[in-house]
Structures are given as structure tokens and as C-alpha cells.
Image (cartoon, rainbow, N blue to C red):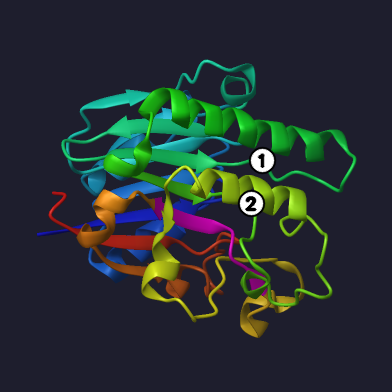
Amino acid sequence: MSLKIASFNINSVRSRLPLLEAWFEHRGNDLDILCMQEIKAEEDKYPRDFFQRFGYKCYLNVQKRYNGVATCSKPEVKYFSKVFGHPLLDEQKRLLHTDFEKFSLVNVYAPHGDLRGTDKFYYKLEWYDAFIDWIKNKFGDVKDKKIILTGDFNITMEDRDVYNPVALADTIGTMPEEREKLRALLELGFLDAFRMLHPDEIQYTWWDYKGAKIWKNEGMRIDYIFITPPLKDHLVDVEVDMWARRKNKIKPSDHAPVIGTFEGLD
């Protein structure tokens, strides 16, 4: 049987409930695991009952008004942790680690950053260093383990992941220092699942609300599913679900969900 794992920067979970309900119904409630970022709600404000209606149990690492990640799952979670042992990883709620019977899953909301030379610029680079160190310490050599990293990484990997690489060169998400950190993460042994199956496709995952960018397809690819080599043979498909982004009557997130389909992991 197949297992569908979605990553979706929801941009405020409570604001997005009408969209989520319509999206779940549109898809026939076929998602097994939903990793959401930018929850923007404390635990007592998180709408657990809503997700329970669709068969999910949610695991949270959240904070008031900012950041926050939630992993909602129909399959049983064997272990979860929201403590990562480093101030940069623990102060802001950006990560959640869950273990399932056959694989580990890390839900990621990386810092947005800012212009070169600002505090937020350096914070983003240092956060990535701490995250890479945590992966090394937690998993060791990842090349022989089944691990999925998914979420909003706030960095484009290449110029083709930006609608106008000339105009947006050296801006947030395209700066060489940022891309170097993303490459360092992948060099631990992770593979870009979308590029494995769609090596030449131009596909974005984020579009600014301003200027009707979604209808002009002026976006960036900053949301990913990264997998380790033992998961290559399990990977069946990766899609960016544009239905959830192209909404008029229901206000969407500025991101579209990325969905990976796997066989033999259920």
C-alpha cells in the first residue's frame, strides 16, 4: 500500500481551517501524514478536534503568534521529540522529530533570514549549522538509514528554482551563503525527492500574495522533501498540489503543499 506524506507551510493554522477542510475533501482525505509549518498558535489554541475529524493525531512544537510546526499522522507514531539540545534549535519552535515503524521524519521550518549583514541573516546561517550538527549527532551516517526531512527550508537550491534569477539574485533565499548551507545539509546523504523524479521541471512552492504572483507563476521553490538513499526505491511520486494555492473564495496560504508518495513504508 502507498503512504502519502505532505508538507505544507500553512501560514496560521486557525486561519486556514476552511482551506484545509476543502482541500481534504477535494483529495478524498488521502493524506496519511501532514507536516505543517508556521502554525502561529500555542497548544491550547491548536484545533486538535478539527484534525481528529479527519483521522489525525497531531504532535506539536509551537509558540504564540510565531513559527511552530505540527506533524499530524494517521499511522502510529513510535516516538516524537521537540527538544534538540541547542539554544538555536530550541528557543524558536521550528523542528519536530517523529519516528515511525520503518522510518524517521523531521518536520522543518527554517528561519527566513534577511539581507546580508543583518542579525537575521547570520542567525539563519548559524541555525543551519546547528541543525546539521544535530542530524550528525542524532543519526550518524544517514546513508544507510531511512530518514525524511520535509518542510519550508526558505532557500532555493538553484537559479531555476526562482522565477527571475537575475532580478532576485543575491536576495533572501538565493544568496550563495544560504545555498551553501542547503548543499551542506544534502551532502550528509540526503536527496531532493522532487528532482529525482522531475529533473527538468520548473515548479515553485511559494508565491507572494502581492501582485497576483500565483497567476503569473512568479514564485520560488523553497519547500522540499529530502530523503536518504534507502528510501529511493520506496519513492513513487512527488507533486506540488496547486489546487490548495489557487483559491479565490477561500484565502490560501502563500505556499502550496508538497506531497510525496511512498510504497512499502506503511
| Callout 1 amino acid | Pro
Please tell me whether residue 141 is drawn above or below residue 11 in the rendered image.
Answer: above
Q: What kind of secondary structure does the magenta stretch mostly adopt?
A: strand
Residue identifier under label 1? 111
N-term mark: 2 or 1:
1
Rendered location of residue 153, percent (x, y): 58, 49
Please tell me whether residue 3 is drawn above or below residue 241 in the rendered image.
Answer: above
Residue identifier under label 2? 154
Look at 67% across and 53% down and name the residue there.
179
Residue 224 sits inside the magenta stretch: yes
Decide which of 132, 50 is in the foreground and name it.
132
Which residue, as the protein is rendered here, is positioned at the far left? 1
2 and 1 marks in contact (CB < 8 Å): yes
Residue 70 left/right relative to 120: left
Query: How far apart in space, not on screen, are marks 2 and 1 (Cα)?
Result: 7 Å
**Start-end of magenta stretch:** 219-226
